[in-house]
Amino acid sequence: MKKWEDNVRKVVPYVPGEQPKVQNIIKLNTNENPYPPSPKVAEALANTSFDTLRLYPDATCHELVAAIAENYKLEESQVFVGVGSDDVLAMIFMTFFNSKKPLLFPNITYSFYDVWAEMLRIPYETVPLTEDFLIKKEDYFRENGGVIFPNPNAPTGVEMPISEIEDIIKANQDVIVVVDEAYVDFGGQSALPLIEKYDNLLVVQTFSKSRSLAGMRIGYAMGNPVLIKYLNDVKYSFNSYTMDQTTIELGAAAVRDQEYFEETIHKVIETREWTKKELSKLGFFFADSKANFIFASHESCPAKELFDELRKANIIVRYFAKPGIDNYLRITIGTKNEMEALIAFLKKYLNK
């Protein structure tokens, strides 16, 4: 090792889902929406002024913040935006999780949490889920430096009742509690109404899944104005111009098209429920997902084997070689045609 490496901040990085370069695949591995963005996004893109790209974007992202606030009937001072929910969450980690007490989050959850904690030298403890992949609220009724968990959880898709979320917040009013709702639009119940009751709650959502804009990178947090101000203070000190002008305009257009949003969400939910029934017939078991994916294991065929065989057939799903979940596949819900092709392959392969 070189001497200068003594001062390098080394972490085990987050591993993003694969983005295959080959054509003609069925891509069910990264929870993207299978439907295109709202047509109003295309209109906004067509009307974007090329000349404005020579100027810095609005650092406050006012147009987008205003659209989100209007959609959720909030004040603009209650909304923070960032470059994808990962950026928003990273800002939250930097801003609020600075205690010597451990940050708490589930042991099976979004795998970026421990990466941020390690990188920022935040003490943390992972809390085991139950055998049914449930978050046990009582496990969070103890001293800590903050609490974060997705709802529905990832990669399991399991939703925690709002009443239990509120119990966790009640028990932790001296720290910040973050509910990461990347998948809530696919049938879950948002904790957003609780921000009016608890000043230590942040609810984080994203345009990547339900609004079909993963390629634009838009995430946002909602909470009381004091928390939002603290986040903006860190953001402006870290990188004032995190979101480009085109993204701001297109994001605002997307959030204003509620009719299209509801239409695509309905299609994904309908296809998810059909897929659950078909997978059950084939011997798969899984928790009742409220997300745009299903976390499934087969009664006799190992997950890794299925992952490899699906890949040979140009069907890409997600496999996690981690203890406790290494016999599960996370299957994103695609179009009805894509899911029919998945089921057809599984029928043929499992009947061999």
Image (cartoon, rainbow, N blue to C red):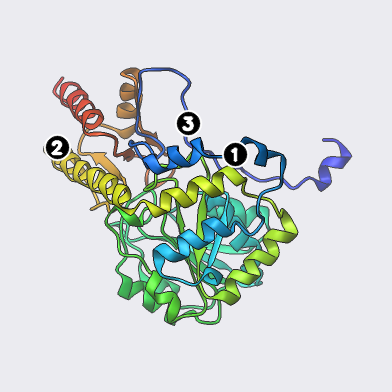
Residue type for callout 3: Glu
| Residue 302 image point, x, y percent | 29, 33
Q: Residues within 10 Å of mark 1 (few under 14, many from 20)?
A: few
Residue 110 percent location from the top left of the image = 46, 51
Vertical order, 172 against 187 (above or below):
below
Quadrant for the N terminus in the image = top right
- Quadrant into which the C terminus falls: top left
Q: Is residue 24 left or right of residue 253?
A: left
Secondary element type, mark 2: helix
At numbered mark 3, what does the secondary structure look like: helix, strand or loop? loop
Disc 1, disc 2: CB below 8 Å?
no
Closer to the camera: disc 1 or disc 2? 1
Q: Do residues under tags 2 and 3 come within 8 Å of each other at their CB atoms?
A: no
Task: Measure the alpha-carbon separation of dots 1 and 3.
Answer: 34 Å
User: Helix or strand or loop: what does disc 1 sit on?
Assistant: loop
- The picture places residue 145, in percent across and down from the top left corner, at 58, 72
Query: In the rendered image, is residue 185 in sight?
Result: yes
Q: Amino acid at mark 2?
A: Glu
Q: Which residue is mark 1?
A: 49
